[in-house]
Amino acid sequence: MLRATAELTALLGRRPELAAAPSLEVLERLLARPDLAVPVLLDLDADCHTVSQAVQAAGGETTRAELAGMLHDPDGRLDGVLGTLAGHGLMALDGDTVRSPHRPGLWAHPFGLGRPLREFTKKITAEALKTMVKALGGQPQGRKADLVTQAEELLRDGASVRARAARLPRQAAELLKTMAAGPPVLEQLYYGSSAHPVQLLVNAGFVARDGWDYEMPREVALALRGDGWQPALTGQPGVPTGPRTEADGVAAALAAIDRVEALVELAATAPITELKSGGVGVRELKRVSKALGVPEQEAALWLDVAYGADLLASESDERLVSTTLVDDWLARAPDARWLALAEAWHRLPQAATYRVVGCCADHMEPLAPPYEFECGAGRIRRAVLDVLRTLSPGLGTDAAGLRAAVGWRTRALADSAHAADAFVGAALREGELLGIVADGALTRLGRALPAEPQPDTAEADERERSRAEAGDAEARDRGTGGLGRLFPTPSTTATLQNDLTAIVPGLPAPELAAFLNSCADLESRDRASVWRFSERTIRRALDQGTDAGTLLDGLARFSAKTLPQPLRYLVTDTARKHGTIKVAATPSVIIASDPAVIAELCGARALRKLSLRQVAPTVALGALPPEETLRLLRQSGHAPVAMSADGTIKAESARRRRLPVDIAGQRGNDPAAAAAAILQGGKTSTADEALALAAVTGEVIVIEWRRREHYMEDLHLADGVVTGYCHDCDAGHAFARTEIQKAYLL
């Protein structure tokens, strides 16, 4: 049981979509579904594809010895490849027996080969077989089965078959070569002329007609490929490399954290407007890039990464707003914050800095960030990182040098031919911005990054929060795979300068950064962060309810040395002027302690929009609401404060929006817990199986709940609750599993 649990946990870690299975019985049926297996297989390397095709060519079940005899495997890679396939649920290993759970198989034509000749006997006539035998140089004898045996014997003489092929007309020979390499079928074609190349191949015994299709039998293709032809397990092709200085990647990683922090702060205070068609348009992307101080292409990367990490979410498909997860992310240690961003980037299906589908010339139009879409860029990115992991430290390469090895690791490179080189380049470029790659080689951070990102679960988040709260550096380091050793210890103090700046070397601690952000403006961040104090920033802190004494105490607490006199004067002078003007409602009442100030305000041309009217020596009425009145007064250089109805000063908190997000349905289950639940699951009902299949495959399902049927999709199962979108109600629903009477797939 323990071994089965460990194996199942590893499988669910690689294929989290299977965690919805309520029992082993349903899990086996899910593993047997080709539509779920094909995407997993496409994420594996060419050797896995070769072995998968070999097992299918052998009828779906064979032995290790027979499989080894079919393949050219000089480096003994077969056992490792079988282990990889079994670890992904694509092959079952039982002692020496190798069995595919998918019948007839995942490949239309394994190795580009057609069906064996014997499988054509029900489709072709005895006369057609006689013609084939004659064309191959034999004398037809006996009944239909005898004719098939004769043809098989003749096709075993590869030299004779190739000699006959060499005598074909040029067009027929070219078609023969194409069909021998695969695919071996010409579908839905009719050729009336006996001189047509395909008809010449039929007359020569190289192609069999099956209805409207023409197919080359397997024996013909093997004879044409040459005696002793075998599919080969090659391993990853060599990568041309050159010496590189090994970088740690920390500076880029800290910059990435800073950029995303600035982005979520921007989205909290000034939400990012979306296009009606979805995504961030050119004008808004320029605003974001200007706010972050980066090029637009890089701004698109941080939008994609922040959205992928659930730090940004769409509000009513109109604007992007920071989520409630931001505060938790900001409170984490630097290595955990960076790891969340790196894993979000690793999971992206698209290239953030080259957002095209890239499958053909018609799909090269850039799509607006940050929404995800399916293309080959994500698989190519992961293949690039896998190839770079095979290079020794101190060696690197470039995009051209990676191409062959990446093509071996994923078919996405061939499927995305129009954008393949750009996708490889995007992976390297984005990796550098995140601190994972530097000059065509993995950084020390990149090597410490887990090859397979850890499951993103609520339990993992809770463990991370507990470690952060406990200040357990060693536990945090274990939780992030040793990344913590590479990051500098966050600074808890700042050097306050006479020029009204605060300098923090390295990464500031969250409490220090929050304090400085409240009373100063961040000017730059590189190896050190620089904040600048001004009358405006001090006034901003005072507007939020603090006073001069509290602010000076905070500065002294976080200062690495004595508080500079210019900064002390700035705080006290700003506090002295702060609040000399007060603004109340109805629609706005302006009160000043000095009658001259009221007179000055009423006569100021810059404040004409307020339509101020003096009603007493120290009181004036305005035509605009208090919020707009405060804004215009501050814009004119004054330091007003808001006043509540009871006459007390009203503190103004910074307006930072946080959009609540429910990620229970988005995040994967804990593989160990899911494995235990599956192993404990007993006999399941038809409804249980239908719900599990709908959750895994995305198929539409009809759920009967409280005597009413709901036509639903986008189903998620978690903690005994079924959630999804109902087309009948045009709304999302959450049903307790025990309350569902019936469920069936359409």
Image (cartoon, rainbow, N blue to C red):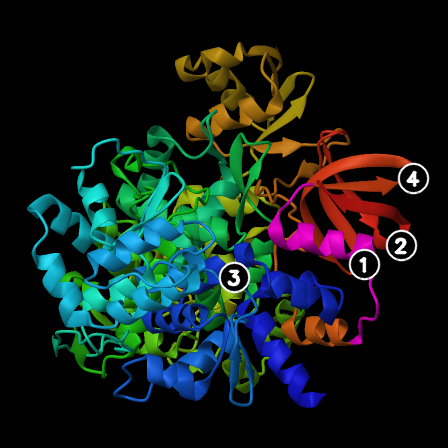
- The amino acid type, in three-letter code, at marker 1 is Gly
> Which residue was labeled with disc 1?
720
Which element carries disc 1, helix, strand or loop?
loop
Residue drawn at the location 74% of the way across and 52% of the way down = 691
Where is residue 264? Give x, y as percent: 48, 48
**Lower position in the chain sequence, tag 2 or tag 4:** 4
**Lower position in the chain sequence, tag 1 or tag 2:** 1
**Lower position in the chain sequence, tag 4 or tag 3:** 3
Eye-nearest disc, 3 or 2: 3
- Whether tag 1 and tag 4 are in contact, CB under 8 A, the answer is no
**Lower position in the chain sequence, tag 1 or tag 4:** 4
Give the alpha-carbon distance from disc 1 to disc 4, as whole Å.
17 Å
Give the alpha-carbon distance from disc 1 to disc 2, as whole Å.
8 Å
**Lower position in the chain sequence, tag 3 or tag 2:** 3
> Which residue was labeled with disc 4?
706
Is any atom of residue 219 visible in this view?
A: yes
Where is residue 107? Give x, y as percent: 42, 59
> Which residue was labeled with disc 2?
738
Give the alpha-carbon distance from disc 3 to disc 2, as whole Å.
37 Å
Residue span colored magenta: 680-700
Q: Is residue 537 magenta?
A: no
Which image quarter: residue 724? top right
For the residue carrying disc 3, how many other residues have a C-alpha within 10 Å: few (<14), some (14-19), or many (20+)?
Answer: few
Q: Is residue 318 above or below residue 586?
A: below
- Whether tag 1 and tag 2 are in contact, CB under 8 A, the answer is yes
- Whether tag 4 and tag 3 are in contact, CB under 8 A, the answer is no
